[in-house]
Image: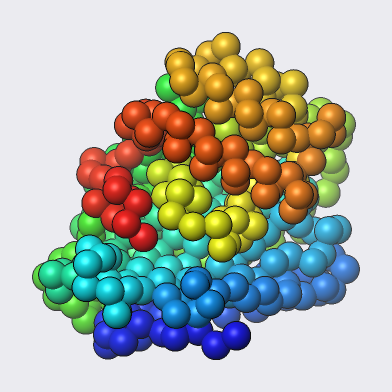
Amino acid sequence: MDIILASSQNATKALYVVGHLQQRFVEKLNSLSNTYGAGQDFEEVSWVRDEGLHGGGNRFEFRDPTLFNTGSVNVSQIHYDENPEKNLKSATAISTIIHPKNPHAPSVHIHISLTELRDGSSYWRLMADLNPSIAYEEDRIKFRDAMKKVAPDTFKEAEQQGDKYFNIPVLEKTRGVSHFYLENFKSGQEANDFAFAQLFGEQVIDTYIDIIDSAFKTRTEISLEDKEKQLAYHTLYLFQVLTLDRGTTSGLMVHKQNDIGIMGSLPAFVNRELLLSWTAKVPEPQDKLVKSLVDCLDEDGRTDEEAKAKLANAVREHYQAHPEALSMQASGNTIPSTVSNHSK
């Protein structure tokens, strides 16, 4: 089914940028699979919004279970060109999470998007965070230094926003060891912002590939304790994404046409009992949400497509029943209206 793309020139340029980054990342991940894994390339899956009228997207999903726990590199473009009542005109994004199978190789989350509003204004959202199950200081330093190098003027603000956004107060923990998060970003020089978004994405992708390439090569001994640490961290990751992450919740609340893609950030397995134990730590009504998430999982804590569909519905139904709980989700220094009111 054909996708109707957004009509604005900036949306077209943004789609080129995120498409370029998607291709760059997938090619490098496939190369790692050929070097260290089973040589199975990521596979493209497409989806459409309202039969393509309002856009859609594609994602490249991992197919090498010897190297990756899970992984997805998503590009989407949603628009409402024909609907002047919508505050959102278009949103073009790359959003990706890679969870290596080796617990000594860190996961990464990257999100880069351009949002255009009906009044003609627009802004970028740029996020990158390194998520190790077993932390290595040299990885954190390399990742942080790369982001600081590519964004020297905004790095301090972005790091502070990221540290705030990925904090999990009820667990007294933070998801990830190095964070970059710019919300509502625009410098006033449009061409420079496009160039910066592309350069930022390239830098993060290349740095992450270097980090896990080294890990696959040198960190080859994996103990049962290492696997247990990874499972516990993946459980924390799911908890943060499904109880605190505004972007995930917003995507799920607006429509049901890409639930599996939105849930593509989840690791393949979590510790069901550990997740259940956190029910007592969260305030009402979020305790009900955590219990609902646990009920979506089998005894092994598997997050296959069937479980992902159930998890998506659990989140959606919870916030439909308890809209006041949206205020309990994470935020940086600002919350864009397109997220807070789910106008996407």
Q: Which quarter of the rendered picture does the N terminus lie within?
A: bottom right
223 to the left or right of 214: right
The answer to whether residue 79 shows anywhere in this view is: yes
Residue at 71% across / 29% down in the picture? 295
Residue at 41% across / 84% down in the picture? 5
Q: Is residue 331 above or below residue 193?
A: above
245 or 23: nearer the eye?
245
81 or 112: nearer the eye?
81
Q: Position of residue 132 (x, y in %)?
A: 61, 42
Q: Is residue 1 above or below residue 210?
A: below
29 to the left or right of 317: right
Residue at 30% across / 46% down in the picture? 340
Q: Is residue 137 above or below residue 292?
A: below
Q: Which residue is situated farthest in the top direction here?
A: 280
Q: Position of residue 335 (x, y in %)?
A: 26, 45
Q: Which quarter of the rendered picture does the C terminus lie within?
A: bottom left
67 or 22: nearer the eye?
22
